[in-house]
Image: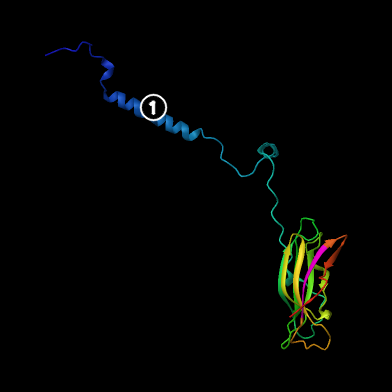
Amino acid sequence: MQHPAVPELSHTHTRPIHWVATATAVAGVVALSSVLQPDAATAAQTAGQAAAAGPKSAPAPIAPPDPATVAFPLECGPVEAVVQKKASGDLDGDGRPETVAVVHCDAPMGTPPDGVYVITRNHDDGKPRVVATLVDPADRRTATELSVRDAVVRATLLGYSTPDVPSCCPDVTDDVKWQWKNGTFVSDTPSQARTV
């Protein structure tokens, strides 16, 4: 039998006392780590933390006014006013959207004329209200298209060349634009109407 060149070291053999000491040390580390934990994360920041975090995100967008909550300047007698079309956008550049609504009386027969109205919210209580009439129902027009884009209201309006044309059969089509200028809506009326 050959003897090792290096004598046996007493600490290379494990004894039960070594296992007990190791288990005790591990248990102590686990117990200590459960007691010494960092503060819980919170969603709220102090003013200093918020300033250090960088610029704030943009405020939530403002909802456009709902035309269903507005009383329109439209005489409908025993029937109700009906919103046929609506489109929204910031028309006056104040950062708050307006709604443009096409409204007519819910007549049981015929084609009632449309009114086209601009609705905004009051600054003090946020209540929607009509601020402009773009098309008066007395003009006997019907809006077939409506859009708001780049602060411009666009509509396609059907109408009549003379008062003798029956209400069932409009014979004139106009593509009209309105834009807010100098405190009022200015119409860009085409120079010549197209006939249907």
Left or right position of 102 against 12: right
Magenta-tinted stretch: 172-179
Vertical relation: 195 (above or below) 122: below
Q: Is residue 128 visible?
A: no
Q: Quadrant of residue 172?
A: bottom right
Give the vertical position of 146 relative to 108 (above or below).
above
Q: Nearer the viewer, residue 37 or 153?
A: 153
Which residue lies at the image location 52% right of the left edge and 35% below the top edge?
A: 37
State which quadrant residue 128 falls in: bottom right
Q: Is residue 57 left or right of residue 14?
A: right
Which quarter of the picture shows residue 107? Answer: bottom right
Name the chief secondary structure element in magenta: strand
Quadrant, the N terminus: top left
Residue 111, placed above or below residue 180: below
For disc 1, the neighbor class at 10 Å (few under 14, some 14 to 19, many from 20) is: few
Q: Nearer the viewer, residue 141 or 25?
A: 141
Residue at 81 percent across and 79 percent down: it is 137
Provide residue 34's location: percent of width, then percent of height: 47, 35
Q: Position of residue 10 (x, y in %)?
A: 26, 15
Which residue is labeled 1 in the image? 25
Report if residue 157 is visible in the image.
yes
Q: Would you say residue 174 sits in the magenta stretch?
A: yes
Q: Amino acid at mark 1?
A: Ala
Where does the image place residue 160, in percent across and percent down from the top left? 80, 82
Q: Position of residue 136 (x, y in %)?
A: 83, 76
Residue placed at 69% from the left, 44% from the top? Answer: 56
The C terminus lies in quadrant: bottom right
Q: Secondary structure at mark 1?
A: helix
Residue 67 in magenta stretch: no
